[in-house]
Each structure stands twice: as structure tokens, then as C-alpha cells.
Amino acid sequence: MTAKVTLSFSDETIEEARRFAEREGLSLSAWMDQAAREKALREVFTAHAAAVGRAGLDLEADALADDQEAAMVDDALFRGRRPRAA
């Protein structure tokens, strides 16, 4: 679904947006839609990262520990051999 809206931009901003859109082979509308969506996602991910940081979580360390644990289980079960593909 698409909504038509009227927006105002400075001459400099609109010219830069037109150049970027043309370079990427997109219409100005499609480029602006993509740019707005990317900005919104950055805001969401930045807020999430800040919340994780405030909570004192270290997700990267947890993921690395999970990988190490999985490797240890594989080694214990298969003694370095991987099971045959079915």
C-alpha cells in the first residue's frame, strides 16, 4: 500500500536525493522511501542496543560462549568426527 504525502525539502537536500536516486536507478519516491525506512530501522536498532547496554548484557560474549559449548558437545559426542549426512 502506498500513501501520497506532500513534503518540503531544501533545494540542496532534494538535489542530493535526486542524484542518489538516479545513481541507484530508483525513482526519487522509491529512494526517499528507502532512506526513511533505513533511518527508522537505525533508530530502532540504536534504541535496542542502548537498552541492552543499560541492562548490562553482553550478547556477543554470550554468543561466543554458546559456540564454544556447542563445539565441546560435538567433540564429546563425535570425537572430532562429524556424523555422516543422511
Image (cartoon, grey):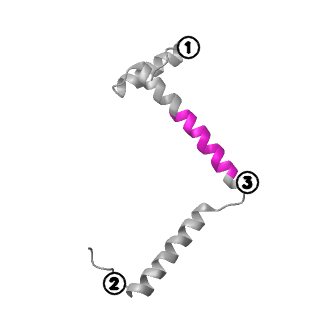
Query: Where does label 2 land, which residue?
Result: 81
CB atoms of marks 2 and 1 within 8 Å = no
| Nearer to me, 47 or 11 | 47
Q: Residues within 10 Å of mark 3 (few under 14, many from 20)?
A: few
CB atoms of marks 2 and 3 within 8 Å = no
Does the stretch in magenta take in 22?
no
- The magenta-colored residue range is 38-51
Amino acid of disc 1: Leu
Query: Where does label 3 land, which residue?
Result: 54
Figure check: 68 above or below 59: below
Q: As drawn, is 67 to the left or to the right of 25?
A: right
Among numbered discs 2 and 3, the one appearing first in the sequence: 3
The dot on residue 7 is: 1
SS category of the residue bearing label 1: loop
Figure check: 34 above or below 68: above
SS category of the residue bearing label 3: helix
